[in-house]
Image (cartoon, rainbow, N blue to C red):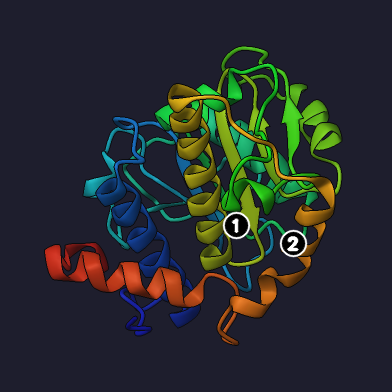
Amino acid sequence: MATAAKCPDMSPAEWEARQQLAACYRIFDHMGWSELIYNHITLRVPGESGAFLINPFGLGYGEVTASNLVKIDIDGQLLDGSPYPVNRAGFTQHSVFHRHLPDAHCIIHTHTTAGMAVSACAEGLRPISFYAAAFIGRIAYHDFEGVTIRAEEGERLIANLSDRRVMLLRNHGTLVMGESLPEAFLKHWMLQRACEIQVAAGAAGTPVDIPADVIAVHQRDLSGVQLPVGPGVPDFEAMVRVIDRIDRGWRE
């Protein structure tokens, strides 16, 4: 991706982050993971404590560009003079994690059909597939409390997440976070696949659980099939090439 700053007072690092996040929104739209103008992917601004980028409320994912992303601080104050508002629900949920978790550089929350379906099931994510096995014992759960606009729910979100970085919001959807955007992207992709397979397997017959000892081996060995450039990096770059062939307007 190009790293030259769009505006004279914007650092190259921020512009690169904006392009990366805009690309992610376009990828999610291409994959069918968007939800009208709702849901959020947020990314910390490199080198700026407490500042992160979020989608402009009112635009679809397919309309997001590097320059129209909104830069806000941890308290929801605009930092870039954007004419767009920010969804209160998105800010309330994402800001609590950005505030309290130093490693949560990118946070993704979606309402995909498969993700919401599994989140609405009593058993949650079951150990029945290659992808689900990667998350077993590493996924948190948080009970539905209504639309997330009350700050006090943040304490319970943090407590329920604990040391995990993937969460099923019961009756609501999925939440993943990563130390980088590509890492969070790959986690979301894998979780989405796990949920899709669980829904399909339930319709097809009686799913068979993977034994705990096999899951342990699977989780131990997963890193052995990744390229040595960082988790999710080649996967994300492959998808950037896909959306570039469709429309490069997100880069502006």
Q: Amino acid at mark 2?
A: Gln
The vertical placement of 95 against 239, above or below, is above
Question: Which residue is rendered at x = 26% and y = 39% of the image?
Answer: 60
Q: Nearer the viewer, residue 151 or 164?
A: 164
210 relative position to 147: left or right: right
Amino acid of disc 1: Ala
Task: Name the foreground residue: 51 vs 159.
Answer: 159
Q: Secondary structure at mark 2?
A: helix
Q: Which mark is residue 79?
A: none
The residue at the far top in this view is 146
| Mark whose residue sits in front, 1 or 2 | 2
Residue at 66% of width from left, 16% of height from top?
144
Question: What residue is disc 1 on?
Answer: 51
Neighbor class of circle 1 (other Cα within 10 Å; few <14, some 14-19, many 20+) is many
Task: Check the picture and name the quadrant holding the C terminus.
Answer: bottom left
Disc 1 on helix, strand or loop? strand
Could you classify mark 2 by the number of other residues whose Cα lies within 10 Å: few (under 14), some (14-19), or many (20 or more)? few
Point out the tag, 1 or 2, that comes first from the N-terminus. Answer: 1
Query: Is 10 on the left or on the right of 105, as rendered?
Result: left
User: Where residue 199 appears, x then y in whole percent?
Assistant: 48, 28
Which residue position holds label 2? Answer: 219
What residue lies at 36% left-to-right and 41% top-to-bottom? 33
Residue 168 visible in the snapshot: yes
